Image (cartoon, grey):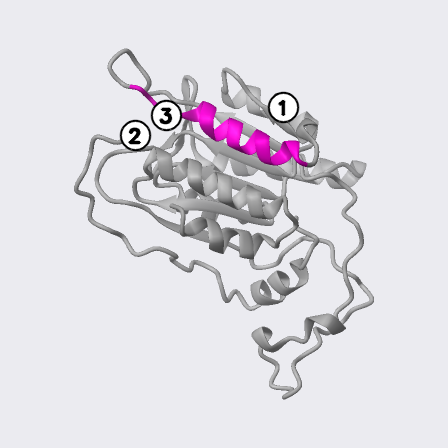
Amino acid sequence: LIYERIRKLLALAQDNIFRNVPILEAQSMSQTNKRIRGSRETIQELELYFPPECKIETNAAISEVPKGKDGGGRDDEVHWPDYPKPDTPPYPHRLLFVPVDVHAGPNDPGLNLKDEYNSIHDILSATDANNLSRTYSSTWGDVMKEIKRQPLILHFSCHSDREAIMLFRQNVVPETIMVALQAHNEEARRSGAAEVQLVVLNACYSDEHARKLAKVVDFAIGHKGDLIDQFAISFAQTLYGKLFQGQSLLNSWKQAEGCS
């Protein structure tokens, strides 16, 4: 997905160094009157998952990663100036925003999905706001219709539990998403269109869903436990702010996890 400095990320991912790595220690939660994207039990941890084999394009002429001067072969000792810069990505970083709040009601202020969308919109406006689209009623069918816009990033902003993510009038299990995205990406490869390469589940209890989705897309991000709404917004704002500045996905994620 990220062509700028992505080779370092791929080198690390090849050995699964960051597979299933918890980022934040669970904390006790003393206040429960905040908007939370799930039940009110614990504050989230966050994980980023890599599939066993990354599918991002690499330079076929490069067979080995240049190592550091000591020749020790460690990934963190790579001499990156010797490593050629990847070609310009063939597709823009188009993002599909999927907002759903099934718990909103007269006595519940609900999730602040507007602020999350606006923060991402402001970030993309610095490059091209046309690369951001959104669903409105946000059924699973609506998501699949919008996939025709060929997003590279699929961002869900919603409630979730350990069984499924909660869309409008339907709880969608990760297996349903996996089958659909795998079929979409296979057709995209045949036709030369853009694949979905990153799925962000900005919702409670989405870590295991992300683990499963990483089998059919290059990267997936999910949260462990409860996710306070304001932290979810800060996480998205920082992740995409860094990502669309040209930083690698790994670096963007490391900076964003501190905001949640």
Label placed on residue 35: 2
Quadrant housing the C terminus: top left
Q: Secondary structure at mark 2?
A: loop
- Residue 181 in percent (x, y) is at 60, 36
Q: Give the alpha-carbon distance from disc 1 to disc 2, as whole Å.
A: 28 Å
Amino acid type of the residue tagged 2 in the rendering: Arg
* Residue in the image at 80% along x and 36% along y: 191
Mark 3 = which residue? 111
Q: Which residue of the protein is positioned furthest toward the left in this rendering?
A: 30
Which stretch is magenta? 109-126
In the image, residue 105 above or below residue 94: above
Disc nearer the start of the sequence (3/2): 2
* Residue in the image at 50% along x and 20% along y: 138
Q: Which residue of the protein is positioned furthest toward the right in this rendering?
A: 61
The reply to whether residue 140 is visible in this rendering is yes
In the image, residue 169 above or below residue 125: above
Q: For residue 187, which quarter of the picture?
A: top right
Taken as a whole, is the magenta stretch helix, strand or loop?
helix
Q: Give the alpha-carbon distance from disc 1 to disc 3, as whole Å.
A: 22 Å
Disc nearer the start of the sequence (1/3): 3
Closer-to-camera residue (26/164): 26
Amino acid type of the residue tagged 3 in the rendering: Leu
Q: Which residue of the protein is positioned furthest toward the top in this rendering?
A: 106
Label placed on residue 146: 1
Callout count? 3
